[in-house]
Image: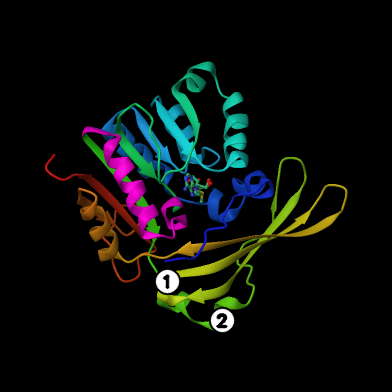
Amino acid sequence: MSRANPYTYQSFVADYYDYLPPVAGRQDLDFYLEVGRTQGEPILELGCGTGRVLLHMAQAGLRAVGLDLSEPMLARCRAKLENQPAAVRDRVRLVHGDMTDFQLRETFRLINIPFRPFQHLLAVEQQLGCLRCARRHLAPGGRLVVDFFQTDARRMHDPAFMQESSPHPEVALPDGTRVRLAERVAAFHRAEQCNDVELVYYVTHPDGRAERLVFAFTLRYFFRYEVEHLLARCGFRVVELFGNFDRSALRDDSPEMIFVAEKEGS
Ligand SMILES: C[S@@+](CC[C@H](N)C(=O)[O-])C[C@H]1O[C@@H](n2cnc3c(N)ncnc32)[C@H](O)[C@@H]1O
């Protein structure tokens, strides 16, 4: 797979991220917290972004390290952390790094990859690199949790998805900025199991100035058994597989694929 991954979360993506309906409405926090409480600390989150899940863990009393490649996303996370009580701040460490190749000199009871950072890893070598690094950083009895969307076959080819659509309502930020998110598939690459995607931000600033900003990136889609094979290649065994964050089983119409894995032989 030779497609370059030009992907980077720019500043405007980080600035608006937490407020957008697909993010603010995501129902995964209770699930990740429950796994965190069961597994215990410390927790590592790969692709922690603005700390949406990471800070939830720390606020609940769990020590957590967050790693991300995007400086703007980490900057948002740091800013949110500064507004937290000292006890919460003390539980969090942020690392600027690549989840395909990292060395933290610490092991973890739980490694989370929430809200699909793994789907930004386009090349199999990157995917293997990430899982192998994760395995090296798991403490005995530790678990890895990684979520994906379950691929809707129509999104692999249907030209209807190339039309810009805006299923989400406009949202208002605390400073009065208003943002409406739209999305489209710019290109299908079925042979490489990825789509070029555009997230389009229609922004109205408090002074009335309007902007159209585009976050363009390539997103890899995965299938259930492919993930199981990838995990097995890297020395993991799947212990639970859910189709949604209510812990329901994976079915044809499940929106998510949530894998809970442990080291083979542990
Ligand atoms: C959709 S966000 C998810 C953020 C957070 N986990 C959450 O649940 O809100 C994906 C994140 O993955 C990060 N990411 C993508 N590729 C990465 C890589 N190779 N190494 C580290 N972080 C990466 C992005 O910078 C971004 O912050």
The residue nearer to you, when weighing 229 against 167, is 229
Left or right of residue 160: residue 211: right
Q: Measuring 83% from the left and 57% from the top, which residue is drawn there?
A: 210
- The residue identified by callout 1 is 192
Residue 131 horizontal/vertical position (percent): 31, 47
Name the dominant secondary structure of the magenta segment: helix
Residue 76's x, y, as percent? 62, 36
Magenta region includes residue 178: no
Residue density around tag 1, few if under 14, some if 14–19, many if 20 or more, within 10 Å? some
Mark sitting on residue 15: none
Instruction: Say whether residue 159 is left or right of residue 34.
Output: right
**Start and end of the magenta stretch?**
117-140
Q: Is residue 245 visible?
A: no
Measured Cα–Cα span from mark 2 to mark 1? 20 Å
Return the x and y of residue 152 as percentages of the image width and height: 41, 72
The disc, 2 or 1, on the residue closer to the chain's N-terminal end is 2
Task: Give the labeled residue for mark 2.
Answer: 160
